[in-house]
Amino acid sequence: MKDFLNSPVVVTIVSSVGAIIVAYIANIWAKHRREARHPDRMSTIFDGYEKLIAQQQDEISRKSVTISALEEATNRLEQQLNETRQLLDKAREELAESKQHNQELKSQLRNMRAEYKESKKEEV
């Protein structure tokens, strides 16, 4: 049996089987490394879409915050504008009253001058 195990045919067969096993393992290992370096195209596409969706979600969140802030500012400005309009209306009313009062004072002054002139004429 020793001669059989030492025969060149058996050594060649064992060497060939060993070489095939080593080549198979090396092939699997090389394929695994290639996949690790170059992932599947569809996986890459899906990852890209996920990143794009995440960016858009961030943009949506940012725009929502901006819109809320602008709405608050607009509401505050509208309130201030309404208050300013009320003050303006009040100032217009006061102006109209002042004009009317001024006309009354002018009229009184004219009447007082006229009376004074009449009283001076009567004295002379």
Image (cartoon, rainbow, N blue to C red):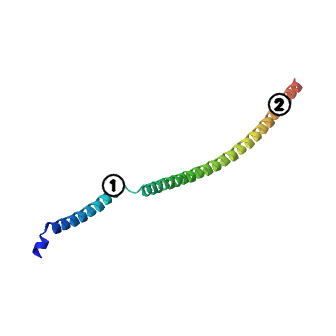
**Disc 1 secondary structure class:** helix
**Disc 2 secondary structure class:** helix
| Residue at (62, 51) in percent of width and height | 75
Residue marked by disc 1: 37
Q: In this rendering, is residue 16 above or below 76?
A: below
Residue 114 lies in quadrant? top right
| Residue at (35, 58) in percent of width and height | 35
Mark 1 or mark 2: which is in front? 1
**Percent position of residue 33, x then y:** 31, 58
Q: Residues within 10 Å of mark 2 (few under 14, many from 20)?
A: few
| Residue at (51, 55) in percent of width and height | 57
Q: Amino acid at mark 1?
A: Arg
Q: Is 106 placed left or right of 15 in the picture?
A: right
* First in residue order: circle 1 vs circle 2: 1
Return the residue nearer the eye: 109 or 50: 50
- CA gap, disc 1 and disc 2: 105 Å
Return the residue nearer the eye: 124 or 79: 79
Return the residue nearer the eye: 43 or 116: 43
Q: Is 92 placed left or right of 78 in the picture?
A: right
Residue 24 lies in quadrant? bottom left
Q: Is 64 placed left or right of 11 in the picture?
A: right
Q: In this rendering, is residue 91 above or below 5?
A: above
Q: Quadrant of the C terminus?
A: top right
Residue marked by disc 2: 110
The residue most toward the bottom is: 1
Residue 122 lies in quadrant? top right
